Image (tube, grey):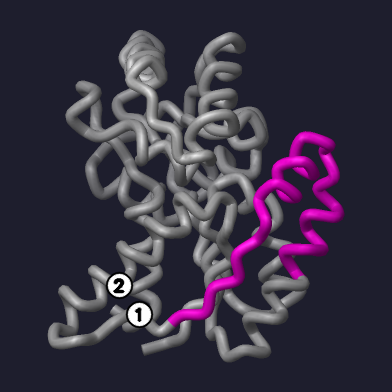
């Protein structure tokens, strides 16, 4: 089993899910008392959140590379960024550390194609929804068209992530708002929804909506185990 280098703490609420899902997947495949071989660096998310909203992506990139190098020195054989938004600097991280980065949008795109869908709604932070770093992977590598919510709904999605989900708050009102946004996206031709923030699966589940849900936390975690076991 390869040693997975996990860059987490963005937020720890979803990093906890990564750790649980990876361990459950390894045990299911290998049996016995097997568990995942990993190293985890967990950021103080308050600092990350402030830099994100200040737009200081250069400093964020330096911090990601620094911790990626620390994981490499610790024995990590590839890297998993336990968040969607911070894949904005995945190419820099891969280039500077010399380690492969398992890209969350790439493995999600493969799953969307496997299910035969060609157009999806992308939910996530405003940085993810409005940026090109994520949508470009889905479109250019996998031929998947992406729609995002209208301006006011993007504000709702973003606010719920930062004011509720990263703090472990799960509110029925917010679930209803997300479900409404997802259902309305069908008018724009969306055939499914990408939960493109690793906290959103804490709020939205398949039974909450009528279109296929792509849980990026679960998809990414399972793909990490694939890489670790060379499946």
Residue at image position (80%, 44%) is 51
Tell me the SS state at disc 1: loop
Residue at image position (58%, 74%) is 100
Q: Is residue 139 above or below residue 146?
A: below
Q: Quadrant of residue 144?
A: top left
> Which residues lie in the magenta part?
38-65
Q: Is residue 87 above or below residue 5?
A: above
Dot 1 or dot 2: first in sequence order is 2
In depth, the one of 94 and 195 nearer the eye is 195
In depth, the one of 74 and 138 nearer the eye is 74
Instruction: Tell me if label 1 and label 2 are in contact, CB under 8 Å.
Output: yes
Q: Which mark is residue 23?
A: 2
Residue 138, percent across and down?
A: 49, 43
Q: Quadrant of the C terminus?
A: bottom left
Q: Which mark is residue 36?
A: 1
Residue 96, percent across and down?
A: 76, 74
Q: Is residue 93 left or right of residue 163?
A: right
Q: Is residue 69 above or below residue 93?
A: below
Q: Which mark is residue 55?
A: none
Q: Quadrant of the N terminus?
A: bottom left
Q: Is residue 162 left or right of residue 211?
A: right
Residue at image position (61%, 12%) is 151
Crowding around mark 2 (Cα neighbors within 10 Å: few <14, some 14 to 19, many 20+) is: some
Crowding around mark 1 (Cα neighbors within 10 Å: few <14, some 14 to 19, many 20+) is: many
Residue 158, percent across and down?
A: 58, 26
The dominant secondary structure in magenta is helix
Q: Quadrant of residue 18?
A: bottom left
Q: Is residue 96 above or below residue 192?
A: below
Cα separation between marks 1 and 2: 5 Å
Tell me the SS state at disc 2: helix
Residue at image position (36%, 40%) is 201
Residue 219, percent across and down?
A: 34, 55
């Amino acid at each position: 089993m390869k040693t997975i280098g996990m860059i987490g703490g963005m937020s720890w609420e979803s990093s906890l899910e990564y750790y649980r899902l990876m361990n459950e997947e390894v045990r299911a495949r290998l049996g016995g008392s097997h568990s995942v071989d990993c190293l985890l660096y967990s950021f103080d998310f308050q600092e990350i959140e402030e830099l994100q909203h200040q737009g200081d992506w250069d400093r964020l990139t330096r911090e990601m590379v620094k911790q990626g190098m620390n994981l490499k020195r610790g024995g990590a054989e590839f890297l998993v960024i336990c968040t969607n938004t911070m894949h904005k600097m995945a190419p820099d991280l891969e280039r500077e550390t010399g380690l492969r980065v398992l890209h969350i949008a790439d493995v999600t795109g493969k799953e969307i194609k496997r299910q035969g869908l060609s157009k999806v709604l992308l939910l996530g932070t405003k940085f993810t929804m409005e940026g090109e770093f994520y949508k470009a992977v889905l479109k250019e590598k996998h031929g998947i068209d992406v729609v995002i919510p209208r301006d006011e709904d993007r504000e709702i999605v973003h606010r719920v992530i930062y004011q509720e989900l990263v703090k472990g708050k799960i509110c029925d009102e917010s679930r209803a708002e997300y479900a409404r946004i997802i259902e309305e996206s069908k008018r724009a031709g969306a055939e499914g929804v990408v939960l493109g923030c690793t906290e959103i699966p804490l709020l939205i589940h398949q039974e909450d909506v009528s279109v296929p849900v792509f849980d990026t936390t679960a998809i990414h975690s399972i793909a990490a185990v694939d890489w670790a076991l060379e499946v």
